[in-house]
Amino acid sequence: MNLNLFDIDKLTEAAEAGDPEAQWKLAWCYEYGDNVAEDTKAAEFWYSKCIDYYREKAEKDDAFAQVRVGNMYSSGNGVPIDRQKAIYWYEKAAEQNHEPGMFNLGQTYYYGWDVPRDLEKALYWYTKLAELKNIDAYVQLGELYGEYESELYDAELSVHWYRKAAEKGCYISQYQLGFCYMEGLGVEADSEQGFYWLTLSAEQGYVFAQVNLAECFLHGWAGKWDDFEKAVHWYIEAAEQGNKEAQEWLEEFDDDLEDANSNTMSNG
């Protein structure tokens, strides 16, 4: 049944009629307050209604269902949190080269979600996923190799993977690649290249790139002349996304401008 995730009335009707996909979607809406008021109890109720359906499909080697069941055990949606069961189902999906299963397994080991952190296992799954040209895997490999205190630290490999993701349009990797060029991490320092990648990231709305660009224009960094108007532009872009640093800078700028105007009027 093709259901609109945001049509709560139709989702509720289908969920009450026993449609497990509708039950899961309705639970998700209640969990995150999507087009309906957040309601943890309602979310848990509907997750618990569909878990048996997805577990049965998972046991029949349905990789999609295996990841969904894994996610439910990982988050405690409809069942008690059980990371070992989550890993079990992620592994089942990953063994079928199911990309979300491979990614979630890598994430579990990389971040140590209720299991011992294991970078070698994370690397194994990220690498297998990268072989399938998965951009999320490129990003994670860039982060993994760029972790300075890790025994796997390799700045050049970090840049390699960030570049692959950046060239595919990933704004996070564009920012990270720009930062590497600015700082000369794993690549020869090149402020123009750094500015280029930061700009691409900022133009896609990545707030950290926007703040960095604002600072470049404000202080004349990265070989750029001071350009106050462009600095203000990027601070505004970042502030509108809730960035506190940008908001505080703009508030201070407004106060300074008011003081300057007041002094001008007094002197006049």
Image (spheres, rainbow, N blue to C red):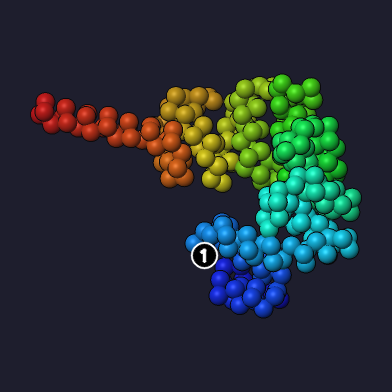
Q: Position of residue 213 (x, y in %)?
A: 50, 33
Give the SS element for disc 1: loop
Q: Nearer the viewer, residue 212 or 65?
A: 65
> Residue 195, can we see it?
yes
Q: Quarter-wise, where is residue 41 in the image?
A: bottom right
Residue at figure coordinates x 63%, y 40% from the top left: 172
Q: Which residue is mark 1?
A: 35
Residue at figure coordinates x 83%, y 32% from the top left: 120
Q: Position of residue 49 (x, y in %)?
A: 69, 66
Dot 1 amino acid type: Asn
Q: Position of residue 93 (x, y in %)?
A: 84, 53
Q: Is residue 227 left or right of residue 121?
A: left
Q: Quarter-wise, where is residue 148 in the image?
A: top right
Q: Nearer the viewer, residue 117 or 204?
A: 117
Residue at figure coordinates x 27%, y 29% from the top left: 256
Where, quadrant-wise, is the C terminus in this rendering?
Answer: top left
Q: Is residue 65 left or right of residue 10?
A: right
* Mark 1 neighbour class, 10 Å CA radius: few under 14, some 14 to 19, many 20 or more: few
The image shows a total of numbered marks equal to 1
Q: Nearer the viewer, residue 60 or 171?
A: 60
- Up the image or down, 1 lies above or below 121; here it is below
> Residue 138, can we see it?
no
Q: Quarter-wise, where is residue 184 in the image?
A: top right
Q: Position of residue 1 (x, y in %)?
A: 71, 76
- Up the image or down, 49 lies above or below 108; here it is below
Residue at figure coordinates x 66%, y 68% from the top left: 23
